[in-house]
Image (cartoon, rainbow, N blue to C red):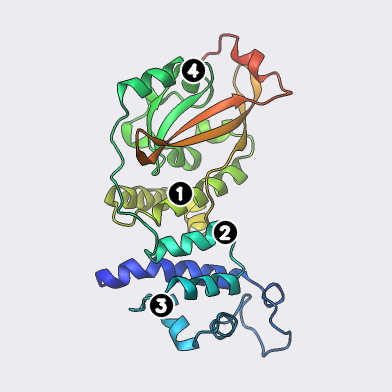
Amino acid sequence: MSLEKEKSQPLGDFLKSRREKLSPTEAGVPAGYGKRRTPGLRREEVAQLAHVSTTWYTWLEQGRAVTPSRQVLDSISKALRLSESERLHVLHLASLDVPAAVPAPEQVSPDIAKVIGQLPYPAFVATDRTEVLSWNAATCRVICDFPSLAPEDRSIAWLVFNHEPTRQAIVDLEAYAAYTAAVLRGRYDKNLNDLVFRRLIDRLNAASPEFAELWSTHDITEKTVKTMRFHHPQAGLMSFTVNSFSQINGSTNVHCCIYVPLEGTDTADKMAQPLAE
């Protein structure tokens, strides 16, 4: 595959995945327009809705040498009923508003690590690749004992799909796994030149059929406040809201996650008690 096609193919793959998930009824396409072999819209229907030629749209999905404008991509996004996050993702994939990627740091500064260490609740710093660079004692007590893991396994995505103790502890595993894959897909498609990221995805695809299936959907989402519930071996059910903060010391691909005990639960009281890791 040429370098030019390699860079354009993710955009085509993403558009194809959205087209195949959109029903004619949702898109406003009249019923009875020919017999359909598969669910979703045809390419010519998307082209008609977006006011572009079918040939040109086909080339776009196939990753051929086309240079779509922002206006055309906005029209295609509207035709495919994309969410705002998905529309922005399309622009990112087309390199219309993406700054040059900055490599993720291999470690956090001692000052940030010190701040994380002083927090009473689980908190850690991770990269877009979900690699955990720094964590506090509460994280080890509630989520995972990171020091006991091999460095290459200190990844939230790896834990969610391949670390059985973590998988057993997460109450809503199926939903959280889908969320994790969608967040990772969005970050990966913005860092296509990151060979370390690519090796992580290859490793996850090889090790987890569950991840491979979710990855193939091309679903994306942004990190948002989430509710996480864990089964702790000693404390029982623990519930948290997960708050994420990015732009740590100017780095756009590193973020901090803080797990705050959910109001109305006894999680804060449990955190105040000694918990075995």
Query: How far apart are labels 4 and 3 at the CA level?
Result: 49 Å
Q: Taking 17 as reference, is 45 above or below it?
A: below
Q: Secondary structure at mark 2?
A: helix
**Residue type at the position of mark 2:** Glu
Q: Secondary structure at mark 1?
A: helix
Q: CA distance from mark 2 to mark 1?
A: 18 Å
Q: CA distance from mark 3 to mark 2?
A: 24 Å
For the point 59% across and 71% down, which residue is it?
A: 78
Choose the circle earlier in sequence order: 3 or 2. Answer: 3
Q: Amino acid at mark 3?
A: Gln
Q: Nearer the viewer, mark 1 or mark 4?
A: 4
Residue topped by disc 2 = 84
Residue linked to disc 4 = 119
Earlier in the chain: of badge 2 and badge 1, it is: 2
Q: Judge by depth and name the residue closer to the eye, 21 or 162.
A: 21
Q: Residues within 10 Å of mark 3 (few under 14, many from 20)?
A: some
Residue that label 3 marks: 62
Above or below — where is 229 with respect to 8? Answer: above
Q: Quadrant of residue 265?
A: top right
Q: Is residue 124 above or below residue 100?
A: above
